[in-house]
Image (cartoon, coloured by chain):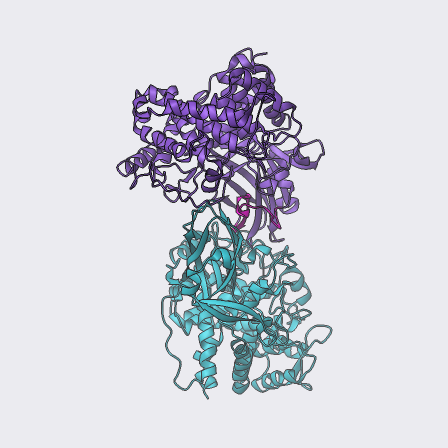
Chain colours: A cyan, B purple
């Protein structure tokens, strides 16, 4: 996910505000904790399996497939001066540091040699010209690097970390007076994962196994020094991704220290008023993205902390970070109208409300839903820490807001949730009122089944909201639908050749990009990894 | 100079040949000597003086001039996100390692940033698109580097050594969600020169001073771990360049250890039969360019060694390398016809004969001239080492070859030297028969004056042959013409804004390139530095 809007937030804290930084005493310690938990990398040396040729194929994902051609041995022994271009396939998605070696075949290298290396997670990335670049994000995310090699033999290292399966090498300049070959190319793959997850239940079908496996790779690739959203792009910690990754991690790699590190990092870098900032950077030193206040993500921190405690029983950390979770509830109190509804227009103006990449999505219902959900999650956390006394107003708040939600957003006659003045029907709205518990299980079932029948309903724009859709289906007892969603949606990516799950996937439009240029999409994206969590947490849903 | 022809030489040494490597016992020691003499760099930190704009100007060299615009302070404080492109002027020619720093002006760097840096020795280099590249040498000589910067603030170093006065920085990709400035750019300039030459005689005129100064800079920039031909291209040791640089060095920086190192390196890397190879490389370990046998350059080694001894009295080195000089004379013996003429057709087929970059030049006369010249230089060297007894045949050879030259190449009626079956009249032929001493001083004068009047005479293609032209004029006592040549030809470059003297300069065609693309020419080239030598060795020629 790349959310690059800069929202200048002016929130007046007349009632719930703090005169000064509420965590002044804690920040340095929290950041030191995060620092101390910086993981060691598990490093693995990877090499390509063969050369490929990119072939146009209307049936392939985004119109291009990679077809094996030569063995590595054949490629390494031939003149690259003559070949001039090659695509190598590493056979799997890799995140790490690439180097390649050049050897002389004839003569002396009497001049420098110029190469362009382009790294792609999917074949179409290598087949689509990057320039003139029309995308909305930085052109520099695209992984093409130009290298001058002064002398051959030489081993050249690409400084930036790369995320790819395929690499195209193009000869951009050379002397005709000597000949040379590429003699090796390798990648020092990095991940903070060093454990193997437990095997799936024996009853799991092959398609489920395949989805789980791709999900595990996706998660592993994103687990670096933080839970990154994507190792190609944006390579950083977002609360929303952290939440989903940590769920999947709890049921697979169980690297709980990474979750703990991220929770501390986000706390240490929260805004002055104590509200969490949606995304933070590690370099050159840890810092938040200025004013990147993202309300639904701030809420999900509480759910993540609750789940972390449940998975680890680490009450020390949960107690330490409790003031942060508690403080996020003030966001809800601050935007709550006397009607029991969240003040959506004001929230939408002052914060970034995400929920999904979907043009035209009205987020009123989803906001109301997630606010109630957050109150409940936080209250559960408080109970686990025996601190529910600090949230005395919360049970009444939940009740009031749930009633308001039903009254203002739900139509019992149609069995659907409507959002905003236009009475928009979307999956997002049904999902979040289901997850909030404001609807009964029966009503939730109806809402989720009904929305699927509405031709014009706004369906999820990507895997992130699909996660909550599956969660809602399971919580409404719609197990068959949950399984079908996983096998159709994530299974659809697998069928299209995904090695890792994609940031953006609309089965109806393979070229969809929130950034105006599909090659800049991330094709290994954390928020898409959650089939791992579903399949392993709810084996009964996914058996044959 | 870039001579990239690969000549496969098959020379049968029936008489003068060696059964095996004649230097087998010496090579390792010679190379170790060279290694031991590797100079320490004199490092200086350089920064730009201001920004410039490139302006089309028919009156400027190659049609472009650099016009000062902003101060560095102004540039460093402004947004580069907005500016997107800049040209910086370092105010002088520099060879070294560039780094630049970036600082944030607003926000966090939420995406990588992509830059293209193009380094130019002359303004037109930055104003002429490099692609699609049509030049004959490697495209990679052109100094444009593409850099991805993952996080800002950052200081980025360009790995390759650069040679430039101007640098263009272009923004090729960035995120609109933060702003940044270039906060510094610097170059660690390197040269093995650490001395200051003596001041010029007080009587020297300002144009002579200017030429001397540009020559000194040219020489200094080329003096690295060897005498390079050009710090931008080809960055390596050629015997022809070494000879001219060492002459200039003897009268200026007096870094005789560098000359000594180069003489040892060339000896250590000579061919198996003991003949010198025209050019050698230092990396990855010292090695010659295979089969790059260049006859006139092999000859000039002897002149260089003789001059080195004269300048230093280092008889130990001269004695040590004497077998190499002596051996080169066998090339002459091997190609000598009974007539006393060099067998030009066979030499031309089996070796590379250079003398000048000039299409269509017939090299018969020049070859005869340089052969005689080399016999004389080597005999002088032998005498200085009291080894003339080893060259008993040489005086007679000189006589025989001089007589043959006069008979076959010189026409006393026209007072001109003719070369080849087409009786070509060229400067090269007059020059080399003058330098050989085969013509009397009077005849030399006439030949040199007459050729200037011949409309169709092939004039020198570049500074390398202009050097020998000036030397010939001086040796013929044509001091005024020598001075005029220096002030017109080299002075012409100075008038056109040269900071360093160029590899290629034809006053009639500023775009001339032996490589089909003028920006790949070297604009700081060793063989052009010799006004330093002339002005300082012959002050009487250059006074007002």
Viewer-proximal residue among B42 and A276: B42
Q: For residue A154: magenta?
A: no
Q: Position of residue A261 (x, y in %)?
A: 42, 60
Front in this rendered view, residue A195 or A166: A166
The residue positioned 41% from the left and 52% from the top of the image is A104
Q: Do we see residue B500 in this rendering?
A: no
Q: Is residue B135 magenta?
A: yes
Query: Along the horizontal axis of the image, is A301 left or right of B323?
Result: right
Q: Residue furthest bottom?
A: A544
Q: What segment carries the magenta color?
A: B130-151
The total number of labels drawn is: 0
Q: Residue B311 location in percent, x, y?
A: 39, 20
| Quadrant occupied by the C terminus of chain B | top right
Whether residue B506 sits left or right of residue A108 in the image: it is right
Please provide percent x and percent y for residue B155: 50, 43
The front one of A216 and A154 is A154
Is residue A255 at least partly visible in the picture?
yes
Residue B105: which quarter of the image? top right
């Amino acid at each position: 996910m790349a959310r690059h809007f800069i929202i200048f937030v002016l929130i007046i804290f007349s009632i719930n505000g703090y005169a000064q930084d509420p965590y002044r005493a804690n920040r340095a310690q929290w950041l030191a904790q995060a620092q101390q938990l910086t993981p060691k990398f598990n490093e693995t040396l990877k090499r390509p399996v063969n050369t490929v040729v990119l072939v146009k194929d209307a049936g392939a994902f985004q119109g291009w497939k990679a077809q094996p051609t030569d063995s590595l041995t054949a490629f390494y022994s031939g003149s690259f001066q003559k070949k001039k271009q090659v695509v190598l396939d590493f056979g799997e998605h890799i995140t790490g540091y690439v180097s390649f070696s050049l050897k002389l075949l004839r003569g002396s290298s009497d001049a420098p040699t110029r190469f362009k290396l382009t790294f792609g997670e999917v074949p179409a990335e290598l087949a689509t010209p990057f320039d003139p670049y029309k995308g909305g994000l930085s052109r520099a995310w695209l992984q093409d690097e130009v290298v001058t090699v002064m002398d051959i033999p030489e081993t050249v290292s690409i400084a930036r970390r790369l995320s790819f399966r395929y690499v195209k090498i193009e000869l951009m300049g050379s002397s005709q007076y000597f000949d040379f070959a590429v003699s090796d190319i390798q990648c020092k793959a990095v991940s903070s994962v060093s454990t193997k997850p437990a095997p799936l239940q024996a009853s799991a079908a092959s398609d489920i196994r395949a989805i789980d496996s791709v999900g595990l790779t996706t998660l592993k690739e994103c687990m670096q020094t933080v839970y990154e959203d994507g190792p190609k792009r944006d390579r950083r910690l977002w609360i929303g991704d952290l939440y989903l990754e940590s769920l999947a991690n709890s049921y697979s790699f169980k690297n709980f220290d990474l979750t703990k590190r991220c929770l501390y990092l986000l706390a240490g870098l929260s805004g002055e008023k104590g509200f969490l900032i949606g995304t933070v950077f590690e370099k050159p030193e840890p810092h938040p993205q200025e004013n990147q206040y993202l309300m639904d993500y701030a809420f999900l921190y509480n759910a993540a902390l609750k789940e972390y405690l449940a998975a680890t029983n680490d009450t020390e950390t949960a107690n330490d970070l409790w003031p942060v979770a508690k403080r996020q509830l003030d966001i809800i109190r601050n935007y709550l109208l006397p009607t029991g509804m969240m003040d959506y227009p004001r929230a939408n103006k002052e914060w970034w409300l995400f929920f999904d990449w979907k043009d035209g999505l009205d987020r009123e219902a989803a906001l109301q839903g997630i606010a109630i959900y957050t109150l409940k999650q936080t209250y559960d956390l408080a109970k686990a820490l025996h601190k529910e006394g600090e949230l005395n107003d919360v049970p009444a708040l939940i009740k009031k807001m749930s009633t308001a939600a039903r009254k203002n957003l739900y139509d019992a006659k149609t069995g659907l949730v409507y959002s905003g003045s236009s009475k928009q029907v979307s999956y997002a709205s049904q999902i979040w009122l289901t997850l909030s518990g404001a609807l009964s299980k029966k009503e939730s079932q109806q809402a989720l089944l009904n929305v699927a029948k509405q031709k014009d309903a706004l369906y999820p724009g990507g895997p992130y909201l699909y996660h909550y859709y599956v969660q809602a289906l399971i919580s409404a007892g719609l197990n068959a639908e949950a399984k079908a969603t996983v096998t159709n949606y994530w299974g659809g990516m697998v069928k299209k050749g995904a090695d890792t799950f994609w940031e953006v996937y609309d089965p109806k439009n393979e070229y969809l990009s929130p950034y105006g240029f599909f090659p800049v999409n991330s094709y290994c994206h954390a928020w898409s990894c959650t089939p791992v969590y579903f399949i392993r947490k709810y084996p009964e849903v996914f058996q044959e």
